[in-house]
Image (spheres, helix red, strand yellow):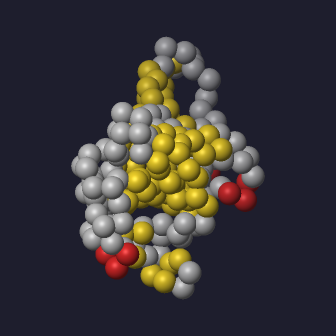
């Protein structure tokens, strides 16, 4: 129950309860513990995880690649954060970039336009501190990132972007997705 207040709701029966998925919290209202109760309580973490898209990808042979969190997946400490890339070429090699910044990389400002290397309309949106190889099947690809149960990571942000080999997309033959800002949370 609202952990910041260090209080608990009084015991009760016949209360109404629901889960608010848009806010990630359990809501409880009313009930009885002798007299009827008209109070309202919410239970939620004080450090929620989040995954929010930013920037745009560039058009390729299958459209603009789109990066999104996997179904019901958020970056929680001690869990695994799944991402999914769609609109990529079928059976293409994919590179997942994981970084700690969305503003700078190697003393350069992000986003960094990539037209000068043959990728017009494409940008580097996240620092490529770690690169993971993968492949797409039927125009999509998934990558799951284990999140260590280290309390220091609570509230930290990671940035993820995907690139796919697409020979007909541009002179370099690579297309890029939007990026994700993944805030690590504690349940």
Q: Quadrant of the N terminus?
A: top right
101, 6: nearer the viewer: 101
**Name of the residue lying farthest toward the right:** 150
Q: Quadrant of residue 107?
A: bottom right
Q: Position of residue 27 (x, y in %)?
A: 46, 32
Q: Residue at x 25, y 50 (%)?
A: 61
73, 126: nearer the viewer: 126
Q: Residue at x 42, y 67 (%)?
A: 125
133, 74: nearer the viewer: 133
User: With respect to residue 59, does 105 lie above or below?
Assistant: below
**Name of the residue lying farthest toward the top:** 14
23, 43: nearer the viewer: 23
Number of disc labels: 0
User: With respect to residue 28, does 87 lie above or below?
Assistant: below
Q: Is residue 24 visible?
A: no
Q: Residue at x 40, y 54 (%)?
A: 165
Q: Position of residue 7 (x, y in %)?
A: 65, 41
Q: Position of residue 82 (x, y in %)?
A: 53, 41
Q: Position of residue 183 (x, y in %)?
A: 54, 55
Q: Residue at x 60, y 46 (%)?
A: 145
Q: Is residue 93 visible?
A: yes
Q: Quadrant of the C terminus?
A: top right
């Amino acid at each position: 129950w609202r952990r910041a207040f260090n209080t608990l709701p009084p015991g009760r029966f016949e209360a109404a309860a629901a889960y608010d998925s848009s806010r990630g919290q359990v809501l409880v209202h009313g009930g009885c513990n002798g007299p009827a109760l008209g109070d309202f309580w919410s239970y939620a973490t004080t450090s929620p995880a989040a995954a929010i898209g930013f920037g745009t990808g560039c058009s390729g042979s299958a459209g603009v690649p789109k990066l999104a969190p996997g179904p019901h997946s958020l970056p929680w400490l001690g869990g695994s954060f799944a991402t999914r890339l769609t609109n990529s070429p079928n059976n293409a090699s994919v590179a997942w970039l994981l970084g700690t910044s969305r503003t700078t990389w190697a003393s350069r400002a992000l986003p960094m336009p990539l037209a000068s290397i043959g990728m017009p309309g494409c940008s580097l949106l996240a620092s490529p501190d770690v690169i993971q190889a993968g492949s797409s099947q039927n125009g999509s690809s998934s990558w799951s990132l284990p999140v260590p149960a280290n309390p220091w990571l609570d509230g930290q942000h990671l940035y993820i972007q995907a690139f796919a080999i697409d020979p007909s997309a541009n002179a370099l033959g690579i297309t890029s997705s939007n990026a994700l800002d993944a805030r690590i949370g504690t349940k």
